[in-house]
Image (cartoon, rainbow, N blue to C red):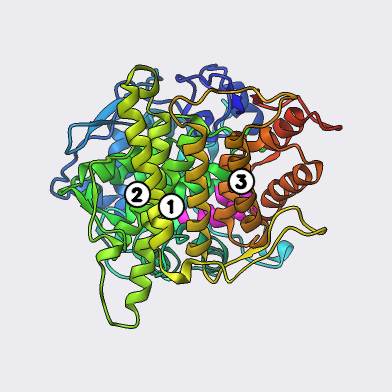
């Protein structure tokens, strides 16, 4: 089994470096990384946290500013900052179940903003320094980053706020919510279309009703946070990095304001925005590193826990909020396998109704039923991964642990036996000369994902079966268990290679290969695994170079690059 060791990142670096997941030298007032890249070097104020916030009455000074509610509330928050650079502190945001979740907040000195505005010479138009329409053949996009620096090398935050005011000049019901739909610009519409064509299916991979593909675009015209999150992810996926960075910065600024609101924990649009931001986070990691901070999952967990008024969750995901919960579950599975840690999920939750109990004669009920069966498999996998990494194998009662293992094994195989016939592959061909993995095709993404999750769960249970010894496979014969693990891994690879457009299948390969990769001895299979990972990064911007380098080193393949590999046996 492969493991990796990441370099410790500073927990007291500037907010900009932490958001971009780069090492900060903590030089004040502008660190070297920000100075070199001409980015705003922002520092967190001391003792900041997301707190319950109850908006008071509207003040005359607030409305005198003439901006949007988002912008005006941002100004009000800025007025309260003391302007001192502080150490990073994580504060706990308590959920309804008493479990604290770490959340981060940031404050920006109004005094520094005023200084920047004096030296930056910010013009009335936030796009004044963008290439002209005549020179480029089109108007400047609304997400153009106006990089004007002051004498200290800062990019004025006022520039970002000014751009935000140009984007969101509209009446709002609450901070970040428009009373009436705000039309998309042409550039925004192109990115939202890219999201619906390519990215929505990532989030809907266990949802037959496609709520993130169909429902989210309807809501972005009413919610600025969700709007910027979608545009940031779509721009990153289409390799439009300047637009992605600007949209991400706006989204985070508004998200911080929204999380201060009392109703934040019950706002499904915030939950959707956070899980979308997590995908953005994963695509933004340098390919040579591949390690993710995954800071947004903590915020997602806090919202889910604090709003949990009961102990049941519907696997058929009838609402967008519940659909977002299942996206979060899948993201937690990926995080847990990469970091080899338990999942941040309340497993006291019960699935209700269970898929096997659902009966409905309506023709469209099949979509709800298949969603429930697919999410049931995701929940089974989450329980399996949590069992494997909960640490109880060292101190727990081995007899009790073996009983838990047997229950999970039966749970996984019961799902495989009882699932609807539509989940079966429409074709599963044998290995041939052209491919070392079986061709496996399905009629829907959720069928393919559930198939891979079943094999994923089997791999984990076989690898972490109690009483089994961890054997170093270096020139030794593989055990029967090893051959079983490889059989399940080949099924996952076959499905991923047969349906390259189904991104969650490649994600499953990426997040499981460190478990079964060392067992692969076939040169042909090794090359095809590397091909799957390389195509994944080429087609979908998902960083895999670090993993490819690690596998090449593990397999002692010629031309291996060792400089950036974080994994070693």
The residue that mark 1 highlights is 164
**Quarter holding residue 170:** bottom left
Nearer to us in this view, 335 or 79: 335
Residue 77 highlighted magenta (yes or no)? no
The answer to whether residue 190 is left or right of residue 544 is: left
- The residue shown at (54%, 29%) is 17
The residue that mark 3 highlights is 489
Residue 239 highlighted magenta (yes or no)? yes
- The residue shown at (37%, 53%) is 326
**Quarter holding residue 172:** bottom left
Overall secondary structure of the magenta section: helix
Region in magenta: 229-244
Q: Which of the two labelled residues, at mark 1 and mark 3, occupies the earlier sequence position?
A: 1
- Residue 558 visible in the snapshot: yes
Q: Residue furthest right?
A: 558
Q: Secondary structure at mark 3?
A: helix
């Amino acid at each position: 089994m492969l493991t990796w060791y990441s370099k410790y990142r500073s927990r007291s670096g500037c907010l900009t470096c932490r958001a971009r997941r780069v090492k900060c030298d903590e030089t004040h007032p502008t660190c070297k990384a920000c100075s070199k890249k001409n980015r705003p070097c922002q520092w967190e104020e001391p003792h900041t946290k997301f707190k319950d916030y109850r908006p008071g009455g509207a003040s005359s000074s607030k409305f005198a500013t003439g901006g949007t509610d988002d912008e005006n509330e941002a100004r009000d928050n800025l007025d309260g900052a003391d302007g001192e650079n502080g150490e990073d502190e994580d504060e706990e945001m308590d959920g309804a179940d008493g479990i604290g979740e770490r959340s981060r907040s940031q404050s920006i000195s109004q005094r520094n903003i005023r200084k920047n505005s004096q030296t930056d010479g910010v013009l009335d138009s936030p796009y004044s320094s963008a290439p002209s329409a005549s020179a480029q053949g089109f108007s400047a996009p609304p997400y153009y980053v106006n990089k004007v620096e002051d004498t200290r090398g800062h990019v004025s935050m006022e520039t970002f706020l000014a751009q935000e005011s140009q984007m969101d000049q509209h009446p709002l019901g609450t901070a970040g919510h428009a009373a009436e739909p705000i039309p998309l610009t042409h550039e925004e519409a192109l990115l939202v279309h890219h999201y619906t064509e390519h990215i929505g299916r990532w989030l809907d991979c266990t949802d037959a009703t496609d709520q993130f593909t169909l429902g989210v675009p309807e809501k972005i015209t009413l919610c600025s946070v969700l709007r910027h999150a979608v545009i940031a992810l779509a721009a990153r996926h289409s390799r439009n990095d300047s637009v992605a960075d600007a949209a991400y910065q706006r989204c985070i600024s508004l998200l911080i304001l929204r999380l201060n609101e009392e109703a934040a924990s019950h706002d499904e649009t915030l939950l959707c925005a956070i899980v979308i931001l997590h995908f953005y986070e994963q695509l933004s990691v340098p390919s040579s590193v591949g390690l993710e901070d995954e800071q947004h999952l903590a915020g997602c967990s806090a919202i889910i826990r604090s709003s949990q008024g009961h102990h049941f969750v519907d696997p058929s995901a009838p609402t967008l909020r519940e659909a977002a919960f299942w996206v979060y579950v899948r993201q937690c599975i990926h995080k847990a396998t990469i970091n080899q840690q338990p999942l941040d999920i309340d497993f006291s939750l019960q699935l209700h109704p269970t898929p096997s109990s659902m009966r409905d004669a309506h023709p469209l009920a099949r979509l709800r039923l298949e969603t429930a069966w697919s999410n049931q498999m995701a929940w089974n996998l989450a329980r399996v991964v949590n069992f494997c990494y909960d640490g109880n194998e060292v101190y727990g009662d081995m007899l009790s642990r073996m009983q838990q293992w047997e229950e999970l094994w039966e749970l996984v195989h019961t799902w495989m036996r009882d699932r609807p016939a539509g989940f079966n592959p429409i074709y599963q061909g044998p290995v041939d000369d052209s491919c070392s993995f079986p061709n496996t095709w399905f009629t829907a993404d959720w069928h393919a994902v559930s198939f891979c999750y079943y094999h994923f769960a089997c791999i984990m249970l076989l690898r972490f079966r109690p009483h089994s010894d961890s054997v170093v496979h270096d020139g030794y014969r593989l055990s029967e268990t090893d051959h079983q693990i490889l059989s399940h891994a080949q099924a996952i690879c076959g499905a991923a290679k047969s349906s390259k457009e189904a991104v969650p299948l490649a994600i499953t390969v990426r997040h499981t290969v460190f478990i079964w990769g060392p067992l692969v001895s076939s040169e042909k299979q090794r090359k095809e695994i590397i091909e799957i990972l390389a195509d994944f990064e080429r087609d979908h911007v998902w960083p895999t170079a670090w993993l490819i380098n690690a596998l090449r080193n593990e397999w002692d393949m010629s031309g291996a690059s060792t400089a950036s590999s974080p994994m070693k046996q």
